[in-house]
Image (cartoon, grey):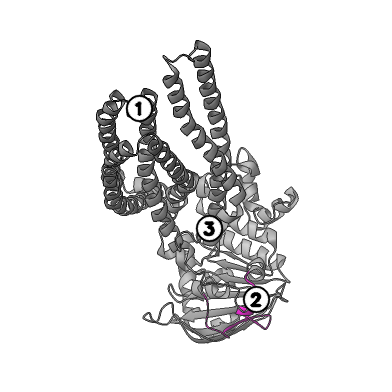
Amino acid sequence: MKTFAKITPLLKENIPKILFGIFLLFIIDGIQLIIPKIMQIAIDKIGTENFTSIFLLKAGLIIVVLTAVMTYLRYFWRIFIIGVAWFIDREIRGDFFKHLMKLSANFFNRIKTGDLMAYATNDLNAVRMLIAFGFVIGVDILLLSIGNIFFMLDISPRLTLLAILPMPILSVIIIVLGKKIHFGFHKVQSSFSKLSGKVQESFSGIRVVKAFVQEESDLEKMSESAYEYVKESISLIKIQGIFHPSFILIIGISMLIVVVYGGEAAMFQEISLGEFVAFFQYLGMFIWPMIAIGWLVNLYQRGTASLKRLNKIFEVEPEITDKDVDSSISELDGEFQIKNLTFRYKDDLPLVFDDITLSHEKGKTLAIVGRTGSGKSTLIDLVTRVYNPPQNSIYIDNHELFEIPLKVLHSNIILVPQEIFLFSDSIAENIKIGKPNVTKLEIERVTKLTRIHREILEFENGFETMIGERGVTLSGGQKQRIAIARALLIDPKILILDDALSAVDTKTEKGILQNLIESRKNRTTVIIAHRISSLQHANQIVVLDHGKIIEKGNHAELLKKNGIYHDLFEKQQIEERLEEA
């Protein structure tokens, strides 16, 4: 029951539709069971005094009408039950996506995109098929089997016992092969996840593959993944392939017994010819339940294997939650304090920060500099709760960070990272993604601030230019400036640029940062950058090194200290002069 816990509430919601569909199925099976009885009566009438061609015609018409009713009702049970399956499929897909959206960045660091794609495609499809046909097949098998046996017993208990004698063999086949199918399908899904991951990785990194002339090597790796998937699939199909022939063989043996002993009983008038034909038809109707048992086992094992895989994802608890929030907090001003922050990613890893303290006024510009690996980006990840900091170490507007609802935190803080993600849409749509109803004038204003406006107009379609997947048709600097423009459009209380101008030249970077400082006089701005010359106008500059704040102050104050900041500034000045020479 734990396996089905996720879909049980959805099934309960749709009980009336499911029951009505099963009711229609009950009528259909009843009609199927009546038809051989009508044929029995018609055949037994042949050669008697009461037999007429009109009677035979009436019997034929009744069978045709009943068959038409069955066809009509089959259409409707499919509408109800398969319709419910699609509804549940939609709900589970929605819940799956919502759940992924709640999970922390750390979860996505641990799991491959290909695995998630496999969960969202193959596994969810297997669950839908189980819901769509599992109940129907189970009920159909039960009704037809009981009905068939009832009518067969009514004709001849002895012949019925002989006919079902080979049936227990089915139980052995189902038990043995069912477990193998379950584990086999699990292996197929795992290999499909690896294949999906490899495909996604190859497409995403196609430019790197081509740049290093690794097409053949990548194709070989792809072939290995595809071969593994095919091998596991064939192994599963071999097991599944035993089901149907085995069932047909058992039914064939039963039919042979009925032909021999039933024919003899008819000859000695223990049963009538009509009863013999009807009995044979009832036995023939066992073919579908026998095939359906194999299909049901297959669907059940596939569906439960997929549900177990999906449940593992649903059971992952978000690390970042609104557990102890103050719901009265609805807006932030932008003042923040860091008090005695000590942090490491895991207990067995070295400290990233060792007892650092920092305060910053709202409406001011803070710059964070430091050597590679000094913890600049990690500090931002803690402030924005990409990772949870220790309790009582970070405050915004005198609110402890965990008191601020995540929605409020993320709507008031916009982070522009170094690695930019743009959607396969127009430039305008990418800029206004956070503010869909914005005017064209506002879009033009923010693109002028980020010095990308003129370059956009040079494109043939201007702001309506389609930029391809991940903005592949744009340069790195263009992507970064578009990303900053969409952040400025929202005008957040706190704007964080995490080395978000690394791909533009020094002159353009200085101009953009100057525009930002002037346009955001009443807003807090945090800038992480390697080029110190661009940060001279920041109100406060913090230098990080080996998990500690080594220096802080404004540009002039830090130069006078002749410390790390001074050394970095002098070094970059020399590099800039060499580039200009």
Q: Does the residue at mark 2 contact the one at mark 3 (Cβ under 8 Å)?
A: no
Q: Which residues are magenta?
A: 388-406
Image side of residue 216 versus residue 36, left or right: left
- The residue tagged 3 is 8
Q: Amino acid at mark 3?
A: Thr
In the image, what residue occupies the spot 30% across and 45% down? Answer: 233
Residue 139 is situated, as x and y percent measured from the top left of the image, at 47, 45
Outermost top residue: 53
As helix, strand or loop, the secondary structure at mark 3 comes to: helix
| Along the line of sight, the residue nearer the viewer: 378 or 112 | 112
Determine which of the numbered discs, if any, sits on residue 276 in the image: 1
User: Where residue 312 sits: x, y (%)?
Assistant: 43, 63
User: Which x, y percent locates residue 95?
Assistant: 55, 57
Q: Earlier in the sequence, mark 1 or mark 2?
A: 1
Q: Identify the mark nearer the N-term, 3 or 1.
A: 3
Mark 2 secondary-structure assignment: loop
Q: Residue at x 53, y 40 (%)?
A: 26
Q: Dot 2 corresponds to which residue?
A: 404
Q: Residues within 10 Å of mark 2 (few under 14, many from 20)?
A: many
Q: Is residue 113 above or below residue 105?
A: above
- Inspect the magenta stretch and tell me whether residue 399 lies in it: yes
